[in-house]
Amino acid sequence: MTDDFLVKRRSDSEVRQIAKRARAYLGFAKGGRVDIVACLRKETIWTVSGVKRLMVKVLPDIELGTADALTSHTEELILIAFKQSVYRAAVLGEGRARNTVAHELGHAVIHNRSMMPRRAGGNDKYRWIRPYESAEHQANVFAAALLIDDDGAKSLDSAEEVSIQFGVSLKCAEIYYKEILERRDRGRAAEKMRKLASSFSAEVKHPHAHDLRFLASPCPKCGERKVFPVGSKYMCHHCDTVSDTFPDGDYSD
């Protein structure tokens, strides 16, 4: 049985967009909690290679051995086999089992390989495979994006609430909630920088602005040599662009 393997490189953002499209095709575009078992009962599924027939089998645990599930592809058909214990746990709403189902749907939607098992203890990963080229990483990102609704998750106050609301494992919820906070913080930081730049721009356009000393480097946006330091940043007096660094720190005459 194979573990992680190289696939077409895709950013996490691209994988999330693919998951949202699959979510819509499966009938959950409006958000809320995904009925993951109902997804398995669909006759077809949208994939990056087009719509394919979907067939799901539930097998005695002993037949799959160390694998919780197994996904295989043909040109027109995707077959996913689950251990009976995993399928039953997903029916009951157990978070880890729901993650396993969503993970397999990720392989079904994004990848195209004959057999891809999902081991009970987690599939082996290899350091030489970078995340954006890792089948396992992409399937994990897909699973979280399929099960968790962005708008609903943003209103929650903890990973535990995300886990309960969307029926995912706590580990999955913690990773996703951290991403929400990081995106939220980046947005807030960007907005704060825009306000500071606007405020400072108004101040430096005071009649005494001619006292400013500009760097020799032109602004990367407008090309004017009107760039001056603002604390740890650099700002263009002509177009108000704020940047991190400029290549030439010398001052113009």
Image (tube, helix red, strand yellow):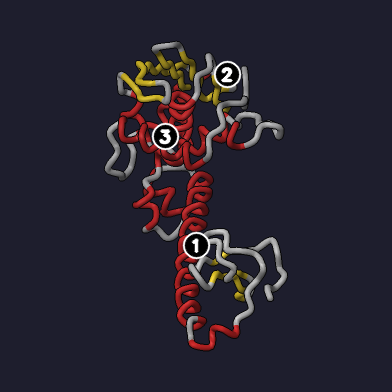
Between marks 3 and 1, how big is the CA–CA gap?
Answer: 24 Å
Check disc 3 and report the residue beneath it: 18
Q: Which of marks 3 and 2 is nearer the N terminus?
A: 3
Q: Nearer the viewer, residue 187 or 202?
A: 202
Between marks 3 and 2, how big is the CA–CA gap?
Answer: 31 Å
Could you say where residue 87 lies in the image, as x and y percent from the top left?
42, 26
Marking on residue 185: 1
Q: Which of marks 3 and 1 is nearer the N terminus?
A: 3
Q: Which of marks 2 and 1 is nearer the N terminus?
A: 2
Q: Taking the image as drawn, is residue 21 in sight?
A: yes
Name the element at disc 2. loop
Of the residues shown, which amino acid type is indicated by label 1? Asp
Between marks 2 and 1, how big is the CA–CA gap?
Answer: 44 Å
Of the residues shown, which amino acid type is indicated by label 2? Gly
Check disc 2 and report the residue beneath it: 65
Name the element at disc 3. helix
Q: Nearer the viewer, residue 191 or 56?
A: 191
Taking the view exactly as shown, the residue that stands out farthest to the front is 253
